Image: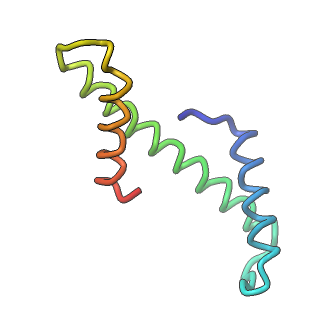
Amino acid sequence: MRISADRALYISRLLQKKLSGNPKLLAKVDGETLHRALAREVSETAKELEQIEDEVRAKLEKRKGNTRDFDLLYARDLDDALRKHGA
């Protein structure tokens, strides 16, 4: 799943807002540092997910079979790959 830098910043702002609103959490860094760290993590996680999806697509392309079942096989293999990677 490819996301733009703007989308990563938007998601990181949403996460920062939720984290800042939790009274049980105490911020050890200022808001801007937290925002940059969250944006970096969102971007890195999206890249990892994209790599996993590419691996699954490559695995399915190697198989010769009915293309009608591609979506079902893709979903199943993606779930398996995500479990292997600890997601």
User: Which residue is drawn at the image coordinates 67% and 60% (left, top)?
Assistant: 38
User: Which residue is drawn at the image coordinates 73% and 67% (left, top)?
Assistant: 34
Q: Quadrant of the C terminus?
A: bottom left
Label total for image: 0
71 or 8, nearer to the observer: 71
Q: In the rendered image of this protein, does residue 12 appear above or below residue 34?
A: above
Relative image position of residue 55 (x, y in whole percent): 31, 33
Q: In the rendered image of this protein, does residue 46 appear above or below residue 55?
A: below
Q: In the rendered image of this protein, does residue 23 appear above or below residue 72?
A: below
User: Which residue is drawn at the image coordinates 32% and 38% (left, top)?
Assistant: 76
User: Which residue is drawn at the image coordinates 73% and 87% (left, top)?
Assistant: 24
**Which of the 4 image quadrants contains residue 61?**
top left
Relative image position of residue 60 (x, y in whole percent): 26, 24
Asked whether, in this view, residue 37 is left or right of residue 82, the answer is: right
46 or 30, nearer to the observer: 46
Q: How is the image coloured?
A: rainbow
**Which of the 4 image quadrants contains residue 33?**
bottom right
Relative image position of residue 1 (x, y in whole percent): 53, 35
Q: In the rendered image of this protein, does residue 77 appear above or below residue 33?
A: above
Asked whether, in this view, residue 64 is left or right of residue 44, the answer is: left
**Which of the 4 image quadrants contains residue 79?**
top left
Relative image position of residue 15 (x, y in whole percent): 72, 61
Asked whether, in this view, residue 10 is left or right of residue 41, the answer is: right
